[in-house]
Structure formats: structure tokens, C-alpha cells
Image: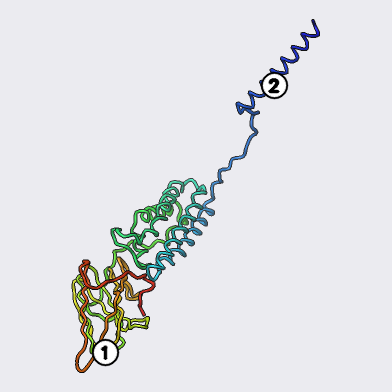
Amino acid sequence: MVGVFTVILAIMVAVGMYVGLDALEESGETAAPAATRSSAPAVLTPEEYQQMLASADAALAASFGRFATAPGPAALDSTATSLALAIDAETDKLSAVRPPAPAKQAHELLVNGLNQLQWEPSGVDIEGRVDGASCTGPAGAASVARTTPAVLVRAAAEQLKAVDARYVFGTFLPAPTELLTRQLGNGTYLKRTSTNGSGLLKVNNEGPRDTAVSLVLAGETAPRLTVYVRAKSSFTARGITDGNYLVFTTAGVDWDSSMRVFSRDCEFMKFTDPLEFKTNRGTYTEWTITLSPTESGNATVEDVDAESYPTG
């Protein structure tokens, strides 16, 4: 009997040890963990923090400069996307560091402002903004500079400078300015290659925005004539030579003479059918086009891309 008892006891002990180990594995319990090193970044010295701010500011200045000088809608779209990505990248870098203790609050405000600012460049061409859709870099930069996130970034920059005069940031942001509404005189010729024709073109601009009207001779790419007609105004262009002409119009707010485009709320259109000017035995052709926001006209028009619009 002693031998049997001993064998049974041994089995029970073995089973108990096995069950105990199995339960231990299922519960996820392990031996006490060894000490681990903290992964939190070290606090930057004032010199290191100043260098990081300077690097981020320089990177954003380069990107914002390209955005602010975009010559038209197409270039504005591409540079706006690049600027948004640049702001996002620099925000990530600043978010990952621990600034000197006195700058902690201002640093958090800066990161928050930049997080919001990154969405503004891509929104400058969205219709419905309080200042209208932007069509050029200068207008886009002015629009971004007026936003609430830009105000937050400037406030954070001022707080950082108050902590330490070496903490300079935000030089890439222009100061907020009033929106421009530059206009040319009604009937101003932007281009006029000849005056010895007999044809006349009367433009009635009944729309709410100023318009530039261009005539492009069939087979050519540059306009022979471009004239500026203010909203709710009329003008008759004279001296048009014979030929079939395509009619292009661009309307908007704030004419930028250096870029030859409206800086806000711009649109570009083309008349589907050409206009024929013909002189014969003392007779000449006079066309009248009426630009109106209604759809009751007898001429059809189509939108054209800004980069396809003739400006030469």
C-alpha cells in the first residue's frame, strides 16, 4: 500500500503543478519586470530651442514665399498644397520636443496655432469665404494672414519672445492688411494691336463684377484686343480689323496689373461661336455683347481654365 500511495501522490502533485502553470500563463502574469528607460525626449536647452524655432521659421518662409508670389489660380493651387504640407511637417517636429520650462505654455499655443493654420492655404480658393476666393498668390497670402490661426501663431510668437528675445518665430507670416479693390478706368485698353479697322464691339457689362474682354483672331493664340469694362458700365471698342474672332472674358474683383488678372472671385469664359467682322463697300460690322448673370441670352459660353486664357 505504501508504494501505491506514493505513486498517486506523485501524480497529483505533478498535475497540480501543471494546472497551476497553465493558469499562470492564461492570466498573463509574469515575473516582475525589469526597470526600463523612459522614452520621453529630453528638455531642450534655450540654445537648442532657439535653433529649432529658427529652422522651422526658415522652412516655412521659403514655402510661404512661393505661395505668396503665385501668378494665377493654377500656381496658387499647387503652392497652397505645398505650403500646407510644409506647415504640417514643421508642426510635427515642434510637437515632438520639450521646450525649456519657461516657454512651455507659449510653445503649446504655437503648436495649436500651426495645427489650425495648415488648413488655411488649401482653403483660399474655396468660394464663400468672407473675402472671396483668391486667384493670385498675393491675395492668397493676404487671406491666410487674416485668419484666426494666423492670429494665434502671432500671439504665440510674441509670448515666446517675451520669455527669451532669442525665441524668434513667425517671420514668414505677413501682417494682416485690408483687402484691395483696385480697378482700371472703364474702357481702358489692356492690349490693342491695331486701330485701322472699321469694326465696332460694344460691351454692356450688366454683371456685378468688372470684366476684361479679349478678341483673339481665329488661328492665333494671343488677343488682338483686350478692353476693361467696369461693372454696370458699357464701352465701345473701335478700329477692329476684319476677321473671325473668338471672344474671351474674365471677371472678378481687384485687378492686379502686374499679373494681368483679377486677384479675387475670378472666372474665365469663352463664347462658343466666333464673331465675324467684315467691311464691304462702305459698310462695317458692329457687334454688341451683353454680359449678364441671367441665362436668357442668345449666345452660349463655356468655362475655360485660367492657364488656357489668352493673356499675351
- Name the disc covering residue 195, or none: 1
* Residue lying at the far right of the rendered structure: 3
Instruction: Return the x and y of residue 247 as percentages of the image width and height.
Output: 29, 77
Which numbered circle lies on residue 18?
A: 2
The mark that comes first in sequence, 2 or 1, is 2
Name the spot of residue 105 as percent of width and height, x first. Answer: 43, 46
Q: Residue at x 69, y 17 (%)?
A: 16
Instruction: Give yes or no for contact between labels 2 and 1 (Cβ–Cβ under 8 Å).
Output: no
Please say if 295 is above or below 12: below
Q: Residues within 10 Å of mark 1 (few under 14, many from 20)?
A: few
Packing grade of label 2 (10 A; few <14, some 14-19, many >=20) is: few
Q: Is residue 168 visible?
A: no
Q: Is residue 198 visible?
A: yes
Applied colour scheme: rainbow
Q: Residue at x 31, y 87 (%)?
A: 193
Picture disc at residue 228: none
In the image, residue 263 above or below residue 156: below
Which of the 4 quarters of the picture holds residue 289? bottom left
Q: Position of residue 245 (x, y in %)?
A: 30, 82
State whether residue 86 is above or below residue 248. above
User: Residue drawn 23% across and 76% down?
Assistant: 229
Where in the figure is residue 292, as x and y percent of width and height? 21, 69
The front one of 281 and 257 is 281
Q: Quadrant of residue 271?
A: bottom left
Q: Which SS class for mark 2?
A: helix
Q: Quadrant of the C terminus?
A: bottom left
Q: Quadrant of the N terminus?
A: top right
Amino acid at pointer 1: Thr
Q: Amino acid at mark 2?
A: Tyr
